[in-house]
Image (cartoon, rainbow, N blue to C red):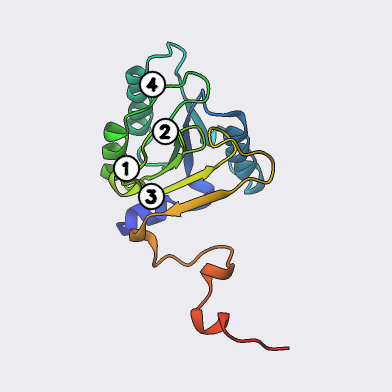
């Protein structure tokens, strides 16, 4: 990313775009992130999807990206709508995100087990998923996050087993 874009992505100055039909918990996570970091509550921009037509919803997301390209750092959306069961084509949104250096995060919870998913072909920055929906799992199910390999040089904010130097993992200090 350019120096200009990196400066724009400071936490306090960034905005998140989501569709208004996202699963409630997804919107709540974004709202709590904004509250926790004392960011302006207007930093969460919700694209209108009231007409329930996937191509219009996609156009509305792209329009919000274009209108807010200097301050948006993340577009987060489901690949398949939890409300309307629409499969959203990502091409236009992905192109707009790449054009402006905006990260694209995809929720796969409602598509995992329903539609073929190839994360390399989707070419998103990150994807998150759980097996609780259509893989017939329940509370305590498997969850996962995918980070595109182009971001593997980024140091994780919270380190766990896979975010630690391999040499440290084998140390067994009492």
Sequence-wise, the earlier of marks 3 and 4 is 4
Instruction: State yes or no: discs 1 and 2 in contact (Cβ < 8 Å).
Output: yes
- Considering the image in quadrants, where does the C terminus appear? bottom right
State which quarter of the image contains the N terminus: bottom left
Q: Closer to the camera: disc 2 or disc 4?
A: 2
Query: Pointer 3: residues within 10 angstroms few (<14), some, or many (20+)?
Result: many
- Sequence order check, earlier mark of 3 and 2: 2
Whether pointer 3 and pointer 4 mark residues with C-beta atoms closer than 8 Å, the reply is no
| Label 2 environment density (alpha carbons within 10 Å; few <14, some 14–19, many ≥20) | many
Q: Give residue 125's mark.
A: 3
**Are the residues at dot 3 and dot 2 in contact (C-beta closer than 8 Å)?**
no
Q: Compute the Cα span from label 1 to label 2.
A: 10 Å
Disc 2 and disc 4: Cα gap in Å? 12 Å
Residue 165 in the image: x percent, y percent?
50, 78
Furthest residue in direction front, as rendered: 136
Residue denoted by label 1: 122
Query: Dot 4: within a 10 Å radius of its alpha carbon, few (fewer than 14), some, or many (20 or more) residues?
Result: many
* CA gap, disc 1 and disc 3: 9 Å
């Amino acid at each position: 990313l350019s120096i200009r874009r990196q400066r724009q992505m400071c936490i306090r100055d960034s905005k998140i775009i989501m569709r208004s039909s996202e699963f409630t918990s997804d919107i709540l996570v974004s709202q709590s992130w904004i509250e926790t970091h004392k960011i302006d509550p207007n930093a969460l921009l919700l694209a209108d999807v009231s007409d329930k037509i996937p191509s219009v919803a996609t156009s509305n997301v792209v329009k919000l990206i274009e209108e807010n390209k200097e301050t948006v750092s993340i577009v987060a959306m489901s690949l398949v709508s939890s409300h309307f069961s629409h499969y959203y084509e990502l091409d236009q949104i992905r192109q707009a995100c790449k054009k402006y250096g905006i990260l694209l995060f995809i929720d796969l919870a409602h598509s995992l087990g329903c539609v073929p998913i190839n994360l390399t072909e989707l070419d998103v920055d990150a994807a998150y998923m759980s097996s609780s929906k259509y893989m017939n799992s329940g509370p305590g199910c498997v969850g996962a996050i995918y980070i595109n390999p182009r971001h593997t040089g980024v140091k994780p904010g919270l380190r766990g087993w896979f975010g630690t130097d391999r040499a440290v993992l084998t140390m067994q200090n009492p």
